[in-house]
Image (spheres, rainbow, N blue to C red):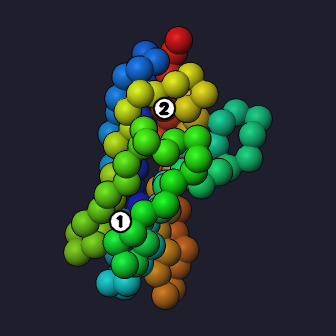
Amino acid sequence: VQLQASGGGSVQAGGSLTLSCVASGRIQIDKVMSWYRQAQGKQRELVATLHVDGSTTYADSVKGRFSISGDYARNTHWLQMNSLKPEDTAVYYCYLSDLFGPYWGKGTLVTVSS
């Protein structure tokens, strides 16, 4: 299983970006899809999760600004990021977990300037 993330880049504070993650390989229908991020010098943190039942959870720091969505059949999930802040600057990693997982994608860098 391979995950390919894309959509990172540089944006000014207040701007928006959408990250995409496409998974390929043998993946179970029931799966959890998430986004993590790791800022320089900090630990990796969970940003948002799309659960098997379609429910979503978010880190407090991004609630109301970020939105996770996904297509279970196409093994694709997205992270819509609005009202970006400089503290959102990090490498963002997509993640997928099924019966045989978990799986990680390579990171995509998001830089937010003030």
Residue depicted at x 50% and y 35% = 109
* Residue farthest along the top direction in this orientation: 114
Residue 12 at x, y percent in the picture: 43, 16
Residue 49 at x, y percent in the picture: 47, 62
* Residue farthest along the bottom direction in this orientation: 99
When asked about the image quadrant of residue 19, the answer is top left
When asked about the image quadrant of residue 87, the answer is top right
Location of mark 2 (residue):
110
Q: Quadrant of the N terminus?
A: bottom left
7 displayed left or right of 94: left
Q: What element does badge 1 sit on? A: strand
Residue depicted at x 53% and y 12% = 114
Residue depicted at x 30% and y 69% = 75
Location of mark 1 (residue):
23
The amino acid type found where label 1 is placed reads Ala
Task: Look at the numbered discs 1 and 2 and tell me whether their residues touch, using CB distance below 8 Å.
Answer: no
